[in-house]
Amino acid sequence: MERGPAIDIAQILEQGKISRFQLRVLALGILALFVNGLDYSAVNVAAPALLRAFHAGRSDMGPVFGWSFFGIFLGSVLFGAVGDRYGRKPGLILSVLAYSVPALLCTSAHSLAEFSLYRLIAGLGIGGAVPNTIALLTETAPTRYRVTFVMAAFVGYSTGNAAIAQVAAWFVPSQGWQIVFLVAGGLGLALSVLLALTLYESLPYLAVTRPGDSTLRKLAARAAPDLVIPQNAHLVASGNAATRFSLDLLFSSYRRIATPLLWIGFFAESLTFMTYSAWLAVILEQSGLAPRAAALTFSYGAFAAIVAILLFGRLIDRFGPRTTVIPAVLTALCVAALGSGRLSLPGLSVVAVLAMGCAAATHQSLNGIVGSFYPTSFRGNGVGYATGMGRISSIIGPVFVGWLMAANTPLQVTLVAIAAPELVVAAAAVGLHIVRNSRAAAGDFKTIAIANEGAGRQAA
């Protein structure tokens, strides 16, 4: 049979209207990150109860957070590579299993050391789910909604944070700290089955890595039901040729500037967001809030994050990465204000909620833009390494704050130290905006036209 027209499936997804195919992928991405948020924040909201159960001091939570974030760092890089090698779908499913089973094992821990081991293993899956979800959504969403899709999925993450905080507030006093890990682990196992049965693989990924796979043609028909695909047509993802990954690729072309800026941005941002979210419940109790009030404040902060993420997702799609400056600066101001000593207990809760919302929006803004700087062939690795830089600082930040706690450092000094890196994030966002605009003018971010598109649409 004569070789037919080349149909660019990536172009069809990027330039077409939002379809049921894309909405299903988005919905499952939201659900995947919801359960990810449950598991990630389970240890944060359970921290005060854990300290009481194991008769430990506040500083003893530092190593627990540190080992967890070390696992998240390894998982970001490891499962990002798995997604590039075997597919976004298997990468995501394996990530979910990797954190769900250890979450259940946490309930049997007899010491903080044993608990830390389980959190280290769970961290692999928590970190691995993020780059695969980002890559899948970036490759599925229409261009004009790309950041919105990714950040909307992270609404699921923030909702998971909020939900597990509610579980902690209402059930830990009667059921013990184990309840939050039972909920997160159990839902994770159910999610892995659901994803295996219903999640679609990335079409651009299949077009690049397995162009002759029959699954590609079937999924393309689902994604674009109005498109007539001739029997002899071949599906491509223009500008995304299969490439053997090496670290040099992350620094090729415009990425020699973009990648360092992304790494700096993720590193600095996580010094604030991950450290703040890890220690928030403990800091609020230290400031005078009752345990339930502290857990509820954490939950309300996660709900505030949902509003902030949706707002800034649309703004970034419209105005670019520079929009991230706004939540970054607001985060720095709010976190620093918590240590001023001038806030009433209700005021403390309100500012803590605002800080959580803005910090989450900053964090997810970077997640929303990172995928667009890398092509399909090594997008999983690109996102994995970038988010991995944030995981490295996530190890450093909580441990450093634990050391400050042990040294009886004034709370105001501790909170200013947590807040300051957001100013670096603001500077990195401006740099990324400049890179993106300059490369868009040069054609690096322009969508390549579909080869022989007319023939593909008109053929019987």
Image (spheres, rainbow, N blue to C red):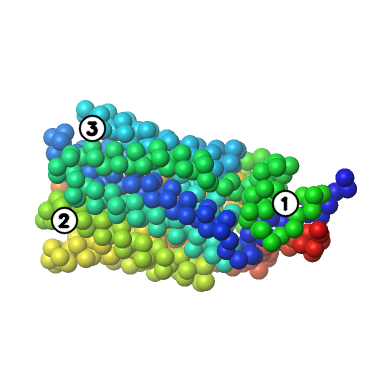
The percent position of residue 248, horizontal first and vertical second, equals 62, 44
In the picture, the disc for residue 293 is 2
* Residue 83 visible in the current orientation: yes
Quadrant assignment, res 310: bottom left
**In-image side of 261 versus 170 (left or right):** right
Residue type of the residue flagged with mark 3: Leu
For the C terminus, the image quarter is bottom right
Cα separation, mark 3 vs mark 1, equals: 51 Å
Residue at the farthest front position: 460
Picture coordinates of residue 433, whole percent (x, y): 53, 66
Mark closer to the chain start, 3 or 2: 3
* Relative height, residue 314 to residue 289 (above, below): below
Q: Which residue is mark 3?
A: 112
Q: Name the mark nearer the viewer: 3 or 1.
A: 1
Q: Mark yes or no: residue 366 visible.
A: no
Please state which amino acid type lies under the numbered disc 2: Ala
Instruction: Identify the residue shown where x is 18% and y is 54%.
Output: 294
**Label pair 3/1, CB-CB below 8 angstroms:** no
Give the label, 3 or 2, closer to the camera: 2
Task: Give above or below for 253 relative to 175.
Answer: below
Q: How much space separates mark 1 and mark 2, taking CA atoms?
A: 54 Å
Q: Position of residue 278 (x, y in %)?
A: 28, 48
- Mark 1 lies on residue: 236
Q: Which residue is located at x 15 percent, y 36 percent?
A: 53
Q: Which residue sits at x=29%, y=39%? A: 181
Left/right of residue 248 with respect to residue 419 in the rendered view: right
Q: Earlier in the sequence, mark 3 or mark 1?
A: 3
Q: Secondary structure at mark 1?
A: strand
CA distance separating discs 3 and 2: 25 Å
> In the rendered structure, which disc, 1 or 2, sits on the residue that comes first in sequence?
1
